[in-house]
Amino acid sequence: MDYDGLRRSCPPAAIVSPTGINMRFNALKQLANRLRIGEKIVLGFGAIGLIFLGVIWYYHVNLRDSVSAYQDLVRVHVARQAHAFAIERGLLAMRSTSDRFLLTRSPELAEQTRQHADTLRAETESLALTDPGSAETAAQIGEAAKDYARRFDAIVRGWRIRGLDESSGLQGAFRDAVHELEERVQRQEVPGLESAVLQMRRREKDYLLRGDAEYVAMVDEIGAGIARRIQASSLPSEEQSALNRLLARYLRDFHALVEQNVRIKGLTAAMYAAAARITPLVESNLLSATEAMQERSAELADSSAERAQWSIVVTAIAPVLGFLLALLITSRIVRPVRRMADLLDRLTRENPRERMATDPAGRDEVNAMGIAVNTLLDHKARFFDWWRSSMQEAIACRELGGAKTAQEQAQAALELQRATETKLAQLATERERLIAEAGRLDQLAADAAQAPLNRAAATELRTIAGDLRTLVGMLEGR
């Protein structure tokens, strides 16, 4: 098979050579060595966090789409339903407080009814904004609610005129008049006049209790009888005039109260009629909103179930990716430490020649430990070589001193020369390393002159200083 032709026919980007892969891998290793262990852990957790953020983002996208669809549902159909319920609750509350006002005539209940009417109007305005179809219904409900509120306000005004209690309004006025009439009658001795006034008060109370117009006629009849009794009495004309004025004032205020009751009754019936017009409109709006919402909800349920399935798949993949990433970061930290432990264990029994793979410019603590272990191994190797050379030199010197023949002397001198040359080669090697270290010091000094001395540079300077002290000690024979 023509591999060269096939390679030439492929686009350059499609060809990935092993050399390119190794270069990329070495670049990644160098980048990893530039990071401290804490930074690697932080980046690892950051990457795991990004994975989970991706899961959250995917969930958020699905949630956003679902929420957007449900918002469209809520904005129209659910809103119509909610406003319909709110309108119905507002109507019930308004009718409840208005009914209680008619029973107790409390000003606080009148104010609560107005507040419920305002809430009802606000709900109808919100209903009109949901969709065009609800605007017409909202307008009808709003008009009926306004009519109800107007009727109720008219009723409240009518009751204020009539009198919210026994001492206010028309009711208080005719009671004041009849009380004064009773006091004057009690001071006079007119036969049957006081009992007639009491009988008129009883019919008045019957009317106020039952509201029957029959009692109004009885009050008028008794009042006419009282007037005749006053006219037929022997009282002075001034006293008769005063009694007639009080009686006329009482009857006038009583009839005004009766007229106000009739007016209040008519306004109450009109108010209930307005409330009755709202209920069918609200129920119709509620029914249509419920049907539309059920149909749209079924569609959204199907799409949400599909999104939920994909979310489960993505959520299951994320922990696996996080575990693999954590395993990779852990292995990058543990594997070199395990290798260093093996080298240090061998160092106690032998002089290993293997060295840790390190990056001189790396900032990783494990890389720094590897450099320190390599330095320790180098120091022991140099010490061992120097010790062996020194022992060979000592042995050669001893043999040279104890040689008896010329051949033995020549052999001992040759061994001494070899040992000395070995030591000189070691010294030359250390000299070259000393020169290289001095060059590194010069470069660091130049860098420090341009920027503040950082922690990494200070550490490297201390390491070089220690190496130089070791070299000096070796050169001095220590």
Image (cartoon, grey):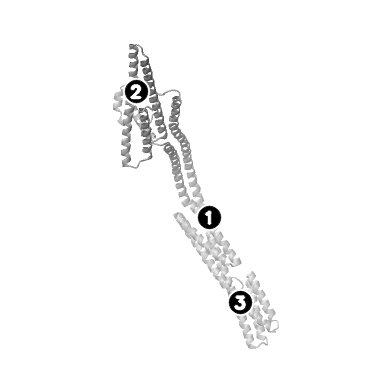
**In this rendering, does residue 17 appear at all?**
no
Secondary structure, mark 1, is helix
Mark 1–mark 2 distance (CA, rounded to whole Å): 103 Å
Residue type at tag 3: Phe
Vertical order, 347 against 309 (above or below)? above
Residue type at tag 1: Phe
| Left or right for 328, reference 93 | left
Q: Which mark is residue 174?
A: 3
Secondary structure, mark 2, is helix
Vertical order, 446 against 421 (above or below)? below
10 Å crowding of disc 2: few (<14), some (14-19), many (20+): some
Q: Are marks 1 and 3 in contact (CB under 8 Å)?
A: no
Q: Which one is nearer the viewer's eye here, 196 or 31?
A: 31
Of labels 2 and 3, earlier in sequence is 3
| Left or right for 106, reference 345 | right
Residue at 54 percent across and 59 percent down: it is 90
Residue 38 position, x and y percent, is 43, 38
Residue under circle 1?
A: 85
Give the quadrant of the N terminus. top left
| Left or right for 267, reference 223 | left
Of labels 1 and 2, earlier in sequence is 1
Residue 85 position, x and y percent, is 53, 55
Q: Which one is nearer the viewer's eye here, 2 or 363?
A: 363
Residue 28 occupies quadrant = top left
Vertical order, 86 against 10 (above or below)? below
Q: Are marks 1 and 2 in contact (CB under 8 Å)?
A: no
Residue under circle 2?
A: 423
Of labels 1 and 3, earlier in sequence is 1
Mark 1–mark 3 distance (CA, rounded to whole Å): 46 Å
10 Å crowding of disc 1: few (<14), some (14-19), many (20+): some
| Left or right for 207, reference 124 | right
10 Å crowding of disc 3: few (<14), some (14-19), many (20+): many
